[in-house]
Image (cartoon, rainbow, N blue to C red):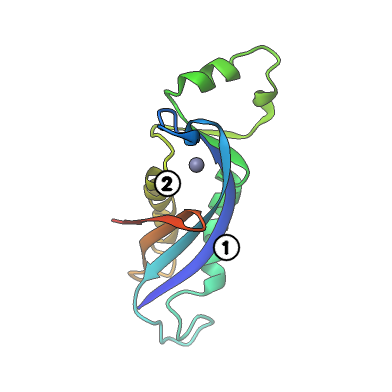
Amino acid sequence: MEITKEIWFDMWHRVPNHKSKCSNVHWHRYTAYITLEWDIIDEVWSDEWMVIDFWDIKTISKWFIDSELDHWFMYYENDQIWKIISEQENSRWEKMKTIKVSFIPTAENIAKWLFEKLEPLFVDRYKTDLKLKQIKLYETPTSYVVYRK
Ligand SMILES: [Zn+2]
């Protein structure tokens, strides 16, 4: 059985070589649908007849997202414009929470990266074979990508 929880976060990014306006620094309210898969637990404990408690998916995911992504600026390590801006003296950018990544932060790459970050957090959560199956990431209300391992 599959179970999915919706989590959203706000993040800035830039796609350096984008042919249109996405080469500008801009913001999205990302919505991630986090899907896990396993059997329904039928043991007598608080999560009986669940795959995992929705609250646990939220708590585990939000812990990472709130501490690493929400309201942060994600940028590609070889983004030359960002290097110039951030190295200016007295740059206002230095107070901005930033996350440097080794990939261009397209929705496709962010979904894959988020999957790889969240997957270990669910492994062995209940000493079962519960596993992260998929992340569906909306970058806008009409545009999304799906990453599965
Ligand atoms: Zn964008």
Which quadrant: the N terminus?
Answer: bottom left
Which residue, as the protein is rendered here, is positioned at the far front?
Answer: 20
User: Toward which corner of the image does residue 42 lie, by quadrant?
Assistant: bottom left
Residue 76, x across and y down, in percent: 44, 30
Report the residue marked by disc 2. 107
Vertical comparison of 3 with 40: above or below: above
Mark earlier in primary sequence (2, 1)? 1
Q: In the image, 132: left or right of 33?
A: left
Residue 112, x across and y down, in percent: 37, 48
Q: In the image, 10: left or right of 48?
A: right
Q: Which mark is residue 134?
A: none
Residue at mark 1: C-beta within 8 A of ligand 1:
no
Query: What residue is at 43 percent from the left and 70 percent from the top?
Result: 126
Secondary structure found at label 1: helix
Find the distance from the CA under tag 2 to the CA under tag 1: 23 Å
Query: What residue is at 52 percent from the left and 58 percent from the top?
Result: 141
Between 86 and 27, the one lying in front of the other is 27
Q: How many marks?
A: 2
Which residue, as the protein is rendered here, is positioned at the far top?
Answer: 89
Query: What residue is at 41 percent from the left and 66 percent from the top?
Result: 35
Pointers 2 and 1 in contact (C-beta within 8 Å): no
Assess disc 2: are there few (<14), some (14-19) or many (≥20) residues with their C-alpha within 10 Å of its C-alpha.
many
Vertical comparison of 33 with 63: above or below: below
User: In the image, what residue type sits under mark 1?
Assistant: Thr
Residue at mark 2: C-beta within 8 A of ligand 1:
yes
User: In the image, what residue type sits under mark 2?
Assistant: Ala
Between 54 and 79, the one lying in front of the other is 79
Report the residue marked by disc 1. 59
Secondary structure found at label 2: helix
Vertical comparison of 81 with 36: above or below: above
Residue 115, x across and y down, in percent: 39, 53
